[in-house]
Amino acid sequence: MYRSNTCGDLRASHINKEVVLSGWVHKVRDKGFVIWIDLRDRYGITQLVLDQDRTTTTLLEKAKELGRETVIQIKGQVIERASKNPNIPTGDIEVLVTELQILNESILPPFTIEDDTDGGEDIRMKYRYLDIRRNPVKDNLIFRHKVTMEVRKYLSDQEFIEVETPYLIKSTPEGARDFVVPSRMNEGQFYALPQSPQTFKQLLMVGGMDKYFQIVKCFRDEDLRADRQPEFTQIDCEMAFVEQEDILNAFEGLTKHLLKEVHGIDSEDFPRMTFDDAMRLYGNDKPDIRFGMEFGELNAVAQHKDFNVFNSAELVVGITVPGGATYTRKEIDKLIDWVRRPQVGAKGMIYVKCNDDGTYKSSVDKFYDQEDLAKWAEVTKAKKGDLICVLSGDTNETRAQLSALRMELAERLGLRKPDEFAPLWVIDFPLLELDEETGAYHAMHHPFTSPKPGQMELLETNPGAVKANAYDLVLNGNEIGGGSIRIHDKDIQATMFKHLGFTPEEAKAQFGFLMDAFQYGAPPHGGIAFGLDRLVSILGGQETIRDFIAFPKNNSGRDVMIDAPATIDDEQLKELRLKLDV
């Protein structure tokens, strides 16, 4: 028996008990006549004590040799701790060591295994197995486990069945590049790793499974950032004989369950917002509604004077910064420099200070009088003491720029509180989006998304006006889930492929298996997929999914711990009949 208890178990009630503990040496404090050792495992830390009055010389000398992270086993008696530590659960006791065995020695770690470590991100990624021993990483992984188990419990209680789908599939266009796998047994042919199990879960509905879910790895070969990995995990779900309202109710229920079980929060019904309103009020389709600062469109009250910057703009739009009238000119200039950065791309920013005496001071005073600026304040809901920030230009670009400024200001003002949760549904997305360079339409979600009821005819006359029977679940400014009611009729699916530029032959080659299945009584169905990594990180009060993944890739898609991706030897290339041209 390596241990009778873990290093987080022992309390005052265990005093005088003989115990066996195993773990890593976290810290050694040697005072000569007495040695204290902090022994650590996944469950906590227990202080061990050896002293010259109660411990043999041989055992004391052995303890003096222990280095950090050495794995040991001890036997001893639980005793009351003379100097108690209220900061840890085991702080009332210590273990008087009577036997000590070194199970495995450790060389000096490249960084300290502490909550506040001296290791930078690169070195910790290289030695991730050591980083996992630190409480912040360990606790994140345990938190992920808890969330995942609650997802499984909720869906299972709602009669969803977990079904595994294949990883080696056919390459189909889903919006990102596929990772491909050469087939040794089928010369010159390749599998693709799934970007999602989309077609398989629809086939499960054709197969009569009715309610499906899967916590599944998905793969997309795209550029990375803090909240994106080449391999990620989805909570993938599908239901048969449902309409949009059924899906929203089911998965609003899942999200409420998680907020309740994880944080003890009882949630009200989630608000719903159309895509058009989200873009108009917040400049993006995943608005953070923990705070206000809604957009106010100023065209009607700003394009009547001799100010060509506004007169030539497609959109003039502003937001109110609460209390911002106290900003100095230097602080405002820094904001203007911020929006001019290439990452944001604005040409400049107009501002209006709403003074406490009811007057206004702006950067365009020579073009607009007090009455004009009062109308701006009315549109942007600015009060005395506030600051109005105004951008102008092309509608889509300007909205994106002001959205970025809104989020930056909220961060500076402390309005994005990680312990507050503000979910909402965004609905009524466009079905198609136009590529202005090619003039071709692309599916905003994927080619299996159904149009809203009654809008199928618009595909022929005004494709850009068609709304999708699709929905996203947004939490704290992040899309955590998205889905749609699917097309389940073969003819409608063929029409959709036509409008997306597929010839009948191309549609047959890519999706013939799905079209064939629809001939055998496909039920109405729809579903949703949650990004588990992102969901867990937001529930955990953080924005970076990497912190909640055991072995993540870096921003170049590399696993620096195992040095992957890597070259393969010539014999493997020959066996796969591959020739490199690099």
Image: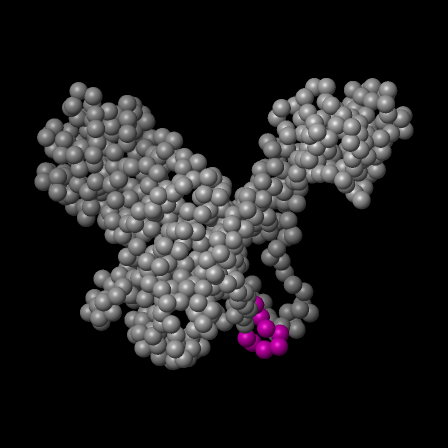
Does residue 307 appear left or right of residue 73 in this picture? left
Residue 222 can be seen, yes or no = no
The structure residue drawn at horizontal position 28% and vertical position 57%, both measured from the top left corner, is 428
The structure residue drawn at horizontal position 17% and vertical position 37%, both measured from the top left corner, is 379
| Count of marks overlaid on the render | 0
On the image, the x and y values in percent for residue 78 come to: 76, 29
Q: Nearer the viewer, residue 568 or 92?
A: 92
The structure residue drawn at horizontal position 20% and vertical position 46%, both measured from the top left corner, is 315
Quarter in which the N terminus is drawn: top right
Query: Residue 523's image quarter?
Result: bottom left
Q: Nearer the viewer, residue 398 or 354?
A: 354
**Residue at the front extreme, as displayed:** 13
- Whether 115 is among the magenta residues is no
On the image, the x and y values in percent for residue 581 come to: 56, 66
On the image, the x and y values in percent for residue 336 come to: 30, 34
Does residue 131 appear left or right of residue 328 in this picture? right
Q: Nearer the viewer, residue 549 or 471?
A: 471
Q: Note whether 12 is above or below 8 in the view shown.
A: above
- Whether 185 is among the magenta residues is yes
Q: Nearer the viewer, residue 170 or 531?
A: 531
Q: Note whether 449 is above or below 224 in the view shown.
A: below
Quarter in which the C terminus is drawn: bottom right
- Magenta stretch, main secondary structure, is loop
On the image, the x and y values in percent for residue 430 come to: 28, 59
Residue 251 can be seen, yes or no = yes
What span is in magenta?
Answer: 177-189
The structure residue drawn at horizontal position 70% and vertical position 19%, both measured from the top left corner, is 83
Q: How is the image coloured?
A: one colour
